[in-house]
Amino acid sequence: MSLQELRNRLDNREIGAVELAQDYLNKIKSRDGAVNSYITVCEDLALEQARAAQAVIDAGSSKAMTGIPLSVKDNICTNGVRTTCASRMLENFVPVYDATAIERLRAENFVMLGKTNMDEFAMGGSSQTSYFGGVKNPYNTDRVTGGSSGGAAASVAAGLCAAALGSDTGGSVRQPSAFCGVTGLKPTYGAVSRWGLIAFASSLDQIGVVAGSAFDTGYVLNSICGYDENDATSSAKAQGGYTELVGSDISKLKIGVPKEFLDGSSGEVKAAVLKAADFYKSLGCEIIECSLPSLEYAVSAYYLISSAEAAANLSRFDGIKYGYRSGLGESFNDLIKNSRREGFGDEVKRRIMLGNYALCSGYYDAYYNNARRIRTQIRREYCEIFKKCDVILTPTAPTTAYKIGEQENDPVKMYLADICTVTVNIAGLPAISTTCGYGADGMPIGMSLTGRAFDEKTIIAVCDRFEREFDRKECGK
């Protein structure tokens, strides 16, 4: 069911909030062992929240998210509920406050089913770097879910929640949504407060939504968006109303298709995305071939910027103030060194070292400053495209989901898989991914629609129009 259908059934007393929450909890117990999408399941809390939601519904005071069961990525702080970032470093961390996004959902009496699995500290593209074991794709448990919000996407695809909150630094909501055959929305940078999102790369991170449809992503975004005085990067431009254009006429829109994204994708992905372009053309949309020449430098720039920011953000986890503390060593330096060595996984260590290297005085100009220049250039190129286009259509990933263990030991290959998503984060733009086809292996193929800053409502409407006609296969069928 869509979130709107759930809302109507709850308000019409066709289903109770406690009954709904218990149904999802039962599914998690019976199905999640094969997928490993949850790190922490909040059964008692979820039922308590559901009872409170039912009281609000009975009083006739329900809001959009009242009684709706969601999963939350485990790098978003939740008061009184363990928040691990899928790392040994924060294995026992229990926040004493809620992230602003969670606070706003609590104000509407949502139901939190649990915290979902992810790549450690959101660093990875497969959700296999988790200290709690990797996530498996519900379509085929031999395949990865993508990352880092793999648990969020898998929980939605497997029917273990109504929708999910994730975070997107370089495609971490959109890529797993593509691999798992669901819809993922990365809002404009600043549209959703980052207060309470444990930072990976502060200038790129953004809380996003994974759901069963474009409409549902906008439905959730309406409840979590907006300015927050605790986050200096949040924006008052995010006003909600993200589903108001759904069902409107999109035939006059101009849709850009950058050739570089197609050239780097597999044949079946390219064919599926071009077929989607033909669908929009049949509606009357104008399809415009355009170009993003700096795409070839985007992955390098992204990993330099994100790793540099990660090295700074993760320096606080030293075993003294925060995080896991080693019992080895006789000196202060030994304590910090051993705590970080034992507390962080290999991928996190790799990015910390890369980031510190790029920030060293001898390499700062050659690497980090050049990456910043590329970032500026990519933003300019998007501005040029949006002078003649309303929306940009690209693949979400160059391939379908690969087999577990196939790329995790080859960082370069895994990093290059982000080629279709990182430019959106670099430019701070909104983008939504949905399924547009299936590969020869039966796995979903994802396409992305990118819009102008704070124009989520347009890309949601354009995505919704495609989803209405596309025959999406249910997971496991």
Image (cartoon, rainbow, N blue to C red):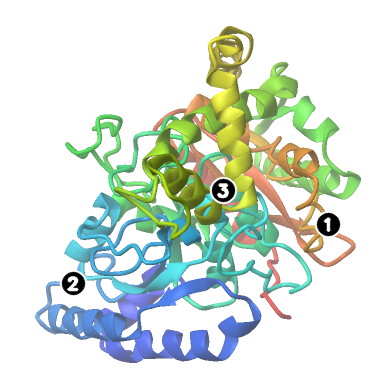
Q: Nearer the viewer, residue 411 or 458?
A: 411
Q: Distance between the residues labelled 2 and 1?
A: 47 Å
Q: What element carries label 3?
A: loop
Of tags 1 and 3, the one toward the viewer is: 1
**As drawn, is 213 to the left or to the right of 196?**
right
Which residue was labeled with disc 3?
172
Q: Nearer the viewer, residue 239 or 72?
A: 72
Farthest residue toward the left? 59
Pointer 3 local density, CA inside 10 Å: few below 14, some 14–19, many at least 20: many
Q: Nearer the viewer, residue 272 or 123?
A: 123
Please provide percent x and percent y for residue 45: 27, 80
Figure quadrant of the C terminus = bottom right
Which residue was labeled with disc 2?
62
Label 2 vs 1, first from the N-terminus: 2
User: Mark 3: which amino acid?
Assistant: Ser
For residue 406, the mark is 1
For the image shown, how many numbered marks are present on the structure?
3
Q: Do we see residue 389 in this rendering? A: no
Q: How far apart are marks 2 and 3 (CA)?
A: 32 Å
Q: What element carries label 1?
A: loop
User: Mark 1: which amino acid?
Assistant: Glu
**As drawn, is 128 to the left or to the right of 65?**
right
Q: How far apart are marks 1 and 3 (CA)?
A: 19 Å
Label 1 vs 3, first from the N-terminus: 3
Of tags 2 and 3, the one toward the viewer is: 3
